[in-house]
Image: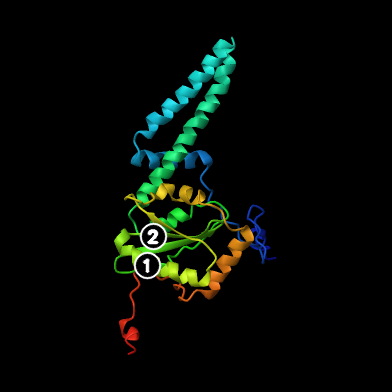
Amino acid sequence: MANSPDSSNSTPSADAPKRGLFQRKPKEAKAKKPGQLKQIAEVFKMTRRNDPQVVWIMVLAFLAVVAVAFLIGFLLENWVTGLIIGIPLGLLAAVFILSRRAEKAAFAQIENQPGASGAALGTLRRGWVTQDQPVAVNPRTQDAVFMAIGRPGVVLVSEGPTHRVKPLVDAERKRLARILPNVTIHVLESGRGEGQVPLNKLAKTMGKLNKELTKIEVNAVSKRINSLGNRLPIPKGIDPYKARPDRKAARGR
């Protein structure tokens, strides 16, 4: 009589993983976002590269707050409570100084680069309508004019030397005046020259302008500019600073 076949060849091992016909693939682990402490560390490194004195300023702020809290607690015969309150407040003061110095360092990195004014407009608070692309640009000199719409009206921010960017600003102002005859048009020059506004103070300067429009009127002005603008939008994927005019088309050839 023939021996029976080995059952181990026909029966799957109990230890082998079972896979269904329609079994889903295991999900890949999502990349974890950096924690808050890691983000603060990265901001601190970036700020220290551009502002080496930030370390000493943060230390002095921390010690000053702790010393004041300790002195008040000592006068009240409870210096322990003064330290318990002063240490967190000192850390808060140091972080506040780091955030302000980090903002200045970030603007210092993009200063004098094309599109820096547009990046500065991105720091505006709610209530402003801005555009990523400039509304007017000179591809040869890379001078540009950016626009923001808010309760003060329309704000044009020029980027470039005053004498060179002035024709772009005047042309854009006339175009907007035809479309919006009753809306105030402000002009600000970004830069560090006389009469210009530094990038890190641009948002603050715009926030101090007199408010003349309501939120509903701001949306209406934005829609009117987008619908009645007499210039073609810049296609996506095209750098406006590298664009060149079609001279043959301009001559009608």
Which residue is at the far right?
Answer: 1
Asked if labels 1 and 2 touch by Cβ distance under 8 angstroms, the answer is yes
Colouring scheme applied when the structure was drawn: rainbow
Q: Secondary structure at mark 2?
A: strand
Q: Is residue 203 left or right of residue 6?
A: left
Which residue is at the far bottom?
Answer: 253
Q: Which residue is mark 2?
A: 158
Q: Secondary structure at mark 1?
A: helix
Which of the numbered marks, if any, corresponds to residue 8? none
Q: Is residue 127 left or right of residue 165?
A: right
Q: Amino acid at mark 2?
A: Ser
Number of labels in the image equals 2
Q: Amino acid at mark 1?
A: Leu
Q: Is residue 159 visible?
A: yes
Residue 44, horizontal then vertical, whole percent? 42, 38
Which of the numbered marks, if any, corresponds to residue 168? 1
Residue 111, horizontal then vertical, whole percent? 35, 52
Residue 3, horizontal then vertical, whole percent? 67, 63
Q: Is residue 41 visible?
A: no
The residue closer to the viewer here, 41 or 225, is: 225
The residue closer to the viewer here, 140 or 149, is: 149
Q: Quadrant of residue 73?
A: top right
Which residue is at the far front?
Answer: 182
The structure residue drawn at horizontal position 45% and vertical position 23%, both measured from the top left corner, is 63
Callout 1 crowding tier (Cα within 10 Å): few <14, some 14–19, many ≥20: some
Q: Quadrant of the C terminus?
A: bottom left
Q: CA distance from mark 2 to mark 1?
A: 9 Å
The structure residue drawn at horizontal position 57% and vertical position 20%, both measured from the top left corner, is 84
Q: Quadrant of the N terminus?
A: bottom right
Callout 2 crowding tier (Cα within 10 Å): few <14, some 14–19, many ≥20: many
